[in-house]
Each structure stands twice: as C-alpha cells, then as structure tokens.
Image (spheres, grey):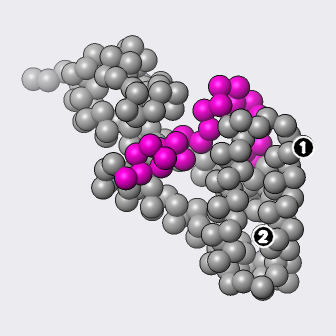
Amino acid sequence: MPRIAEFDKEKVLQNAMYVFWEKGYNGTSMQDLVDATGLNRSSIYNSFGSKLELYQSTLSRYQKDAGGMFQRALVKARNPLEAIRLIFEGFLPEIIEDEKGKGCFVMNCKAEMGNQDRDLKKWLLDTQEHTLSTFQDLVKDGQEQGIINKKQDCRSYAYFVFNAFQGFRMTGILVKDKKVLQQIIDNTLKVIA
C-alpha cells in the first residue's frame, strides 16, 4: 500500500515557484527542486506528475496571488479609471522591492516557454484573456460613465492597457525609480481618459 504524502503542498509549491522564478523552467533541474522542496524525486513525481506539471502548478499559484491584487483594486476603486490605476499601483511595491529583478513570473514563462508546450500555451492564452476581459470591462464601464474616451472601442483600449501593464512590469525589472514608474501609469491613463 503506497504511503500517503505528508507535506505542506502550499509550502512545496511556493519553494518550487521561487526556484523556477529565479532560474526559469529550463534552468531548473530536478535536483534544484529536490533541494528547494525537501522532497525526493519520486515524491515530486508522485505528487505533482512531471516537472512541467509542477511548473504549471506554481504558475497557477502565482496567478491566484496576482488575481488577488486585481480583486483588491476593483473593490477599493470608486470608478473604472481609478480601478485601472490601482491595479498598476498595486504592483509598484513588488516591482520596487524586487532587488533581484525577477520580474513577473507569468511574463517570464511567456517569454521562455510560450511556444514550447501546447498546454502551457493554452494556459497562458487563457490567463491573458482573463486579464484582457477585466480591462475591457473596466474600459467599457468607464466609457459608459464618460470618464474614459470613446476614440477607440473597449477591446482596443483593453489591449492598449494590457500591453502598457506588461511593459510596466518589464520596465520594472531594471528600473526601480518610483517616479519613473508612476509616470508610466499616469501616461497610460492620460491616453484613455
């Protein structure tokens, strides 16, 4: 009878995520994961499947945390334009405090693995579509309220805001100047206001 796994799954995912985040998928060895998680190889395989499945699980965990930041901004905002601002500004502390320049784990995955695995690509596209839909809903609501202009349709502006958000996150890998990062946010909002 196989032994039941006895470990804190969330802690293992967190530790594995940090390794993948620092080294990338291809740069992370199974020995790195063994060292980081405290599990032996067979426990990792039995509990999570393959290295790729463990990677996907860590991405989902990260995305859940990032989704929480979006949700807090949506709850706190008085209007859709402010919600977009608060989403961007919610990530400012993470960007500024990221001394190692790790950047966004999902964007790193997109750059490294976006065209390497069909299932992973589908997950990335689904995640991107969810974020785009959030921005599209905010823009549409803002246009209906008259606080976001109608020079472009809500989907076009959603792509603009999404692209600006990704650029903001990428810029933050090397730029830690809060004033510069805040200007990126302000300039993005000026385009749609």
Q: Is residue 144 left or right of residue 129?
A: right
The residue where tag 1 is placed is 179
* 1 vs 2, front mark: 1
At which x and y percent is residue 97?
74, 30
Membership of 12 in magenta stretch? no
Q: Which residue is mark 2?
A: 80
Residue 104: quadrant of the picture:
top right
Q: Residues within 10 Å of mark 2 (few under 14, many from 20)?
A: many
Q: Amino acid at mark 2?
A: Pro
**Range of magenta residues:** 90-115
Residue drawn at x 52%, y 61% as measured from the top left? 128
SS for callout 1: helix
Q: Estimate the x, y position of residue 149 in percent, counting from the top left.
A: 82, 81
Earlier-in-chain disc, 1 versus 2: 2
- Could you tell me residue 91's position as x and y percent? 72, 45
Q: Quadrant location of the C terminus?
A: bottom right
Residue 169 versus residue 16 in the image, above or below? below
Q: Quadrant of the N terminus?
A: top left
Q: Dot 1 surroundings within 10 Å: few (below 14), some, or many (20 or more)? A: few
Give the answer, above or below, for where 112 lies relative to 7.
below
* Spatial separation of the CA atoms under disc 1 and disc 2: 23 Å
Return the residue found at the far left.
1
Query: Going 75% across and 53% down the picture, which residue do you hit?
Result: 88
Q: Residue at x 33, y 48 (%)?
A: 116
Q: Amino acid at mark 1?
A: Lys
Compared to 80, does 60 lie above or below?
above
